[in-house]
Amino acid sequence: MAATATISLPGEVPEQWALGDWTVPKGRYLDPDFLALEYERLFPCVWQMACREEELPEPGSFYEYTIGRQSILVVRQVDGSLAALHNACSHRGMRIIGGAGRVDEFRCRFHGWRYGLDGANTFMFMEEEFAERPVECRNLRAVHVDTWGGWVFVHMGDEPEPLLDWLDPLPTLLAPFNLEGMRYAWRKSTVVPSNWKTLLDAFVEGWHNVGTHPQMLRVDEGDPPSARPATVEEFAHGAWTPSVMYRNHSRFIYQPRPFTGVVDPGRAERVSRPEYFATMMAYQNKHIGSLATERDVRAARSLVGRDIDGPVFPAYLQACKEFAQKEGVEGYPDMTVEEFNAGNGDWHVTPTMVFLVEQSCLLGYRMRPNGDDPDSCIWDVYSLEHFRSDEVPDTKWEHYPVWRDHDWGQLITQDLKNLGDIQRGMHSQGFQELWINMKQEGAVINHHRIADRFLFGVDHGEPPPFEM
Ligand code: FES
Ligand SMILES: [Fe+2]
């Protein structure tokens, strides 16, 4: 395995980056030194999602995962297993290949050394002219690799904890969703003018919904609904999305508001109707391209005019399942409402992976720093679905070097428009620290608490248990 020097950690957080009770110093988002520490101590020491298994369909398929200056090749082996290799020739370090594709072997084009799919050296030109070294010095250095949920994860460290232990409690709570049975519906990538964690924070709390996405309260008012700023009264109708914090990860969930500050009986009656619900699903499918599939929209519409006993949502889940089964979707989740609620929500898998998981589909994000610039990041966004096998679309990564060059749909565009201004605003001399909502922005501070273990050797202990 890769020889990673054991880094001795200071055991305390330097004052300028120390977390407050519910505050986060802005330097963690702005300082090049902090980004350098993340590259040195965080990313080499955690499991990171590299790609989906479907991106490595046959022996010789490879995918290059990059994080900062590190490039790792994930490679499908002849026996179907996976290997991950540092992408650096063992002769003089040349990067061997980039992007994704299929090869029979790896060949360094500098002096022509060759490597098998497992990284073993198969050809060294004029071997007798080299000094004796242990045979493994000839090979590409291996990286730990494992899979869960259809994703491939890599870990550059020496002795990582097992992937499933690191991911706890996701493997248990998400098992009924059969994530490994999902396939890409679409996948896109762009560059965003903010720190990678500024982008992360924008997708790990649902509390910005009314401020940033006010049209979500008005989906029955035309298509697209008006995005005029929400009135103070409208804020009372926003979803309540408390954070659940775990030792290594976080999520937010959707809950009924725990108080009834403003009651508008007319509105409550209107939004509980199946027709309003169907319009919401149609909005998500059309303007986000995820969270509800085309089949889900038909399932939601089938409830309109039906005599539904109780709330719409469980009936919707059941209808989605019936439509999928009737239309021959193999591996569609067959779970109870309780199992759905136990896993549903918006997950942050430390450090770079975020997804919102539904019964039929999943909206995923990945955010990584962009070179040494703390004010820039690389953003990947994709949707996965449970497809019938003959429906699976042939997708490729679409790259948009400038995010404004692409139409991301109404909702995602609103998030993207915020990000440059959030990053710029944090640079203001009039702003020093983020002030975190204790109920609904827990994920925003939890990832910093988790990172402190790796960056500084400071363990903040178990997060407080979730309370409504
Ligand atoms: S650097 Fe690869 S063969 Fe010389
Ligand atoms: Fe948003």
Image (cartoon, rainbow, N blue to C red):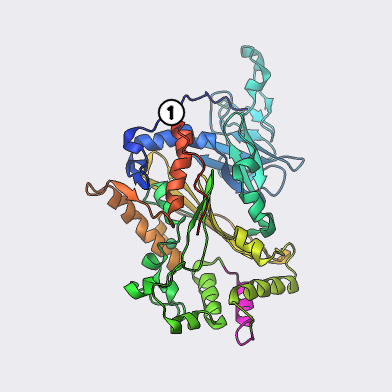
Camera-side residue of 159 and 251: 251
- Taking the magenta stretch, the answer to whether it contains residue 300 is yes
Residue at image point 75% right, 74% down: 326
Q: What residue span does the magenta drawing correspond to?
A: 292-307
Q: Residue furthest toward the left?
A: 430
How many marks are shown on the rendered structure? 1
Q: Position of residue 45 (x, y in %)?
A: 53, 34
Q: Residue furthest toward the right?
A: 79
According to the image, label 1 marks what residue?
Answer: 11
Q: Position of residue 146 (x, y in %)?
A: 66, 41
- Asked if residue 223 lies left or right of residue 131, the reply is left
Query: In the figure, residue 322 lies in which quadrant?
Result: bottom right
Q: Position of residue 117 (x, y in %)?
A: 69, 36
- Asked if residue 28 lies left or right of residue 271, the reply is left
Residue at image point 70% right, 64% down: 335
Q: Position of residue 438 (x, y in %)?
A: 41, 54
- In the picture shown, does residue 105 fall above or below 51? above
- Taking the magenta stretch, the answer to whether it contains residue 226 is no
> Which quadrant holds the N terminus?
top right
